[in-house]
Image (tube, rainbow, N blue to C red):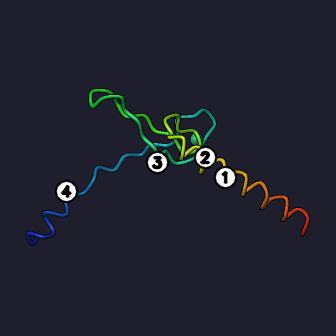
Amino acid sequence: MSNTDRRLLTEAPKMYVHYCEEKGCEEWGGWGNSPSPAVATRWWCFEHFPHKSHEQEQALRRKLEAAERGDIVQRLLG
Ligand SMILES: [Zn+2]
């Protein structure tokens, strides 16, 4: 094993399996929040993440609205 390989192994990020903690949601929890290092991080998908900034909230709303419009267009076309 070369030095480069060893460094990659020891510095590889720990793999966590954490899905959104919202009941019934099966999205990947890519958004974590922990009030302090002593508190275990909790994870949510972007949609359910309760600590979004105002800008992030707006961006999500636009995305959802765009998706809704997309559905309507598809229904009209179909
Ligand atoms: Zn979720």
Specify the label residue 30 is tagged with.
3
Mark 1: which amino acid?
Answer: Arg
Q: Secondary structure at mark 4?
A: helix
Q: Residue at x 54, y 46 (%)?
A: 55
User: Neighbour class for label 4 at 10 Å: few (<14), some, many (≥20)?
Assistant: few
Return the residue nearer the eye: 51 or 26.
51
Q: Give the residue displayed 17% in from the left and 56% down from the top.
A: 10
Determine whether label 4 and label 1 are within 8 Å by CB: no
In three-dimensional space, the C-alpha distance between marks 4 and 1, rounded to whole angstroms, equals 38 Å
Residue denoted by label 2: 58
The residue that label 4 is drawn on is 11
Residue at 54% over, 41% down = 54
Please rate how many residues cluster around mark 3, counting C-alpha atoms within 10 Å: few if below 14, some from 14 to 19, many from 20: some
Q: Label 1, secondary structure: give it.
A: helix
- The picture quadrant for ligand 1 comes to top right
**Compared to 10, does 43 lie above or below?**
above
The amino acid type, in three-letter code, at marker 4 is: Glu
Mark closer to the chain start, 4 or 1: 4
x and y, in percent, of residue 34 in the image: 37, 32
Residue underneath mark 1: 62
- Which callout, 2 or 4, points at the residue further toward the start of the chain? 4
How far apart are the two marked residues, 1 and 3, measured between alpha carbons?
Answer: 20 Å
| Image spot of residue 65 (x, y percent) | 73, 52
In the image shown, does 77 or 52 lie closer to the viewer? 52
Q: In the figure, 27 relative to 11: above or below?
A: above
In front: mark 4 or mark 3?
Answer: 3
Q: Identify residue type, mark 2.
A: Gln
Quick one: SS at disc 2?
helix
**Disc 1 within 8 angstroms of ligand 1 (CB):** no
Badges 4 and 3: C-beta atoms under 8 Å apart? no
From the viewer's perspective, tell me whether residue 29 is left or right of residue 16. Answer: right
Contact (Cβ within 8 Å) of mark 2 with mark 1: yes
